[in-house]
Image (tube, rainbow, N blue to C red):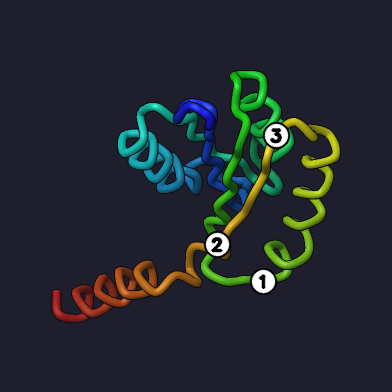
Amino acid sequence: MSSPSAHSLILFAHGARDPAWAAPFERLRALAQAAMPQAGVQLAFLELMQPDLPTAAALEIARGAERITVVPVFLGQGGHVRRDLPQLLEQLRQAHPQARIDTVPAAGEDDAVLQAIAAYCVAAMRG
């Protein structure tokens, strides 16, 4: 069985031209890292920002990751998650056959995430 440090998490976001756009994603990365200090936690972007997913994955594998879980930090399963991400994952699996690379549905597809966003929206109205 692999040691906990052999498992890494990559938060995969779209990217934007404005560097300030990434601030909440950096906070999310820091929160995830604090919850799992033994694991590598990286932020990767589809476009416009660095690192991209192949770069982040290669870095984690070079650090000893045997398993990587990619979490699409998108609200829905749009074209980027349905088309672009599977292609990127297949390329990663071919480039790094020694590593297990998995993904999960977009964060916004999770009921707990939607409930948290709904609670925020309701609180904003009542604010």
Q: Is residue 100 left or right of residue 2?
A: right
Determine the secondary structure under disc 3.
Answer: loop
Residue at 48%, 27% in the rendered image: 3
* Residue indicated by mark 3: 99
* x then y, percent, for residue 90: 81, 49
Name the residue rendered at 63%, 46% in the picture. 17
| Picture coordinates of residue 81, whole percent (x, y) | 68, 63
Question: Does 78 sit above or below residue 11?
Answer: below
Q: Are marks 2 and 1 in contact (CB under 8 Å)?
A: yes
Which amino acid does the dot numbered 2 rest on? Answer: Phe
Closest to the camera, between mark 3 and mark 2, is 3
Q: Is residue 90 left or right of residue 13?
A: right
Residue that label 2 marks = 74
> What distance separates the C-alpha of mark 2 from that of mark 1?
8 Å
x and y percentages locating residue 52 in the rendered image: 69, 38
Amino acid at pointer 3: Ala
Nearest the camera: 94 or 14? 94
The residue that mark 1 highlights is: 78
